[in-house]
């Protein structure tokens, strides 16, 4: 009898939804970050919007938008049970890629967009084709989910995505014309999930997969090159390629340094958890954030620690650090922000502006900080932009990206 009552209740609920409302699909919250070029600061918000903000206007608390500021909402079709078709905010996980006049973004829903700064500032309809705006794929077509950022190199945009068919996940790399968004080539299916931002070096494109492969492709044709690398476990971070080496973190808690063309790593370093965020190179030292809550400084040639002890932030570090002068800016999933001396590994915590003992930010931080014209910018998961003075090591201002 109880089961019958439950079925009747479910049926009535479905009828009510059908007659009076609907259950809509909601987009996940992204963790896109912040980039700068010239005098312009671009911010990817948690709800699928791209902002251009003026640091002085935000510091003075001026109404948004001030002169030169704008926002653009990227939407995606959605349909829930009992609902007519509609649009919801798209999800961006990778930060925007900014140029002098355009900014390129990719969404988890499988779209790549090129935005013209002046057209977005004027709030014109998208896309303004004559101003170099485009969307790929066009119309209602879409790729598989895109998690990493696009890589823009001269006149080509490279992006990777994944799709699952019959329980088999494969990834593809796409090359697009930067000016018009035309498809230049599509790679053959690659085994494993591709969440990586492609790394482009000396005419080759490198991607790492969740099933433990590093693939090298021709940047001009997309053809697989003879060299690839296979590990026993999957790669969790995007590859960093520099000076004939590729650096990448794995699910077995190791950071690998692999010479291009080799089948064995030159060195590997074990942390206490995954190296989720990509490492950062500065001179002959690599700074590697780890989900064990530590920032490691490693000699690039040998992989040996440079500091006596790693810097312990006390909470998982998912974001890559930002270089600000002679310091590394470290933001944690606990919401703390630290300035870490690049030479000694000693760190200074940034206090919360309202209550010093609380975490710096009022939410976790997954997006990489940005150092721009003497200020450090951090976007937390509460969709608030924090402007931090690296001299006083205090929060100078906050700006909520949640605007109606």
Image (cartoon, rainbow, N blue to C red):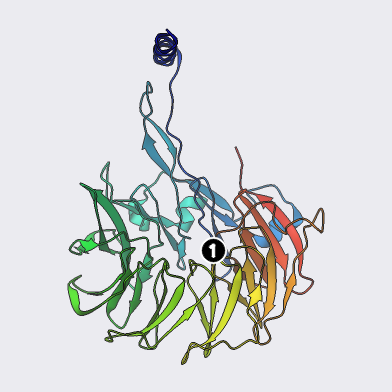
Give the left or right position of residue 310, taking residue 47 as reference.
right
Please say if 376 is above or below 81. below
* Residue at the (48%, 66%) spot, across then down: 276
**Can residue 314 be seen from the camera position used here?**
yes
Please say if 396 is above or below 371. above
Q: Nearer the viewer, residue 67 or 266?
A: 266
Q: Nearer the viewer, residue 298 or 366?
A: 298
Please say if 296 is above or below 313. below
Which quadrant is the N terminus positioned in? top left
**Can residue 178 be seen from the camera position used here?**
no
Q: Position of residue 273 (x, y in %)?
A: 51, 68
Give the left or right position of residue 255, taking residue 208 as reference.
right
Q: Secondary structure at mark 1?
A: loop
Q: Position of residue 256 (x, y in %)?
A: 41, 79
Label 1 neighbour load within 10 Å: few <14, some 14-19, many 20+: many
Q: Nearer the viewer, residue 63 or 228?
A: 228
Q: Position of residue 402 (x, y in %)?
A: 61, 43
Please say if 81 is above or below 266. above
Residue 192: quadrant of the picture: bottom left
The number of numbered badges drawn on the structure is 1
Which residue carries the number 1 mark? 318
Q: Position of residue 338 (x, y in %)?
A: 69, 69
Give the left or right position of residue 88, taking residue 382 as reference.
left
Which quadrant is the C terminus positioned in? top right
Q: Nearer the viewer, residue 340 or 199?
A: 340
* Residue at the (81%, 58%) spot, across then down: 357
Residue 116: quadrant of the picture: bottom left
């Amino acid at each position: 009898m109880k089961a019958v009552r439950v079925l009747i209740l479910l049926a009535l609920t479905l009828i009510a939804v059908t007659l009076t409302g609907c259950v809509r699909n909601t987009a996940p919250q992204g963790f896109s970050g912040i980039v700068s070029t010239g005098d312009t600061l671009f911010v990817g918000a948690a709800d699928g919007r791209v902002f251009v903000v003026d640091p002085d206007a935000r510091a003075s608390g001026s109404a948004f938008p001030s002169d030169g500021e704008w926002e653009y909402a990227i939407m995606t079709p959605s349909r829930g049970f009992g609902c007519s078709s509609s649009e919801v905010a798209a999800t961006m996980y990778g930060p925007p890629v900014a140029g002098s006049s355009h900014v390129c973004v990719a969404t988890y829903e499988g779209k790549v967009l090129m935005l013209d700064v002046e057209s977005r500032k004027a709030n014109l309809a998208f896309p303004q084709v004559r101003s170099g705006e485009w969307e790929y794929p066009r119309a209602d077509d879409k790729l598989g989910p895109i998690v990493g950022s696009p890589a823009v190199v001269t006149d080509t945009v490279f992006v990777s995505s994944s799709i699952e068919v019959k329980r088999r996940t494969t990834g593809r790399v796409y090359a697009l014309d930067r000016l018009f968004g035309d498809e230049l080539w599509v790679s053959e299916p690659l085994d494993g999930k591709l969440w990586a931002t492609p790394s482009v070096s000396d005419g080759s494109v490198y991607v790492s997969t969740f099933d433990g492969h590093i693939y090298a492709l021709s940047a001009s044709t997309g053809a697989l090159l003879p060299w690839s690398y296979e590990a026993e476990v999957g790669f969790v971070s995007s590859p960093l390629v520099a000076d004939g080496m590729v650096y990448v973190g794995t699910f077995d808690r190791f950071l690998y340094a692999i010479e291009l063309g080799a089948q064995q790593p030159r060195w590997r370093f074990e942390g206490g958890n995954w190296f989720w965020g990509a490492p950062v190179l500065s001179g002959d030292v690599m700074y590697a954030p780890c989900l064990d809550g530590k920032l490691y400084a490693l000699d690039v040639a040998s992989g040996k620690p440079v500091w006596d002890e790693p810097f312990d932030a006390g909470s998982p570090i998912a974001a890559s650090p930002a270089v600000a002068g002679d310091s590394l800016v470290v933001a944690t999933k606990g919401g703390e922000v630290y300035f870490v001396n690049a030479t000694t590994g000693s760190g200074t915590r940034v206090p919360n502006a309202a209550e010093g003992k609380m975490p710096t930010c009022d939410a976790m931080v997954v997006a990489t900080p940005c150092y721009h014209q003497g200020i450090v910018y951090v976007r937390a998961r509460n969709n608030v932009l924090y402007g931090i003075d690296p001299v006083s090591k205090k929060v100078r201002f906050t700006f909520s990206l949640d605007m109606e």
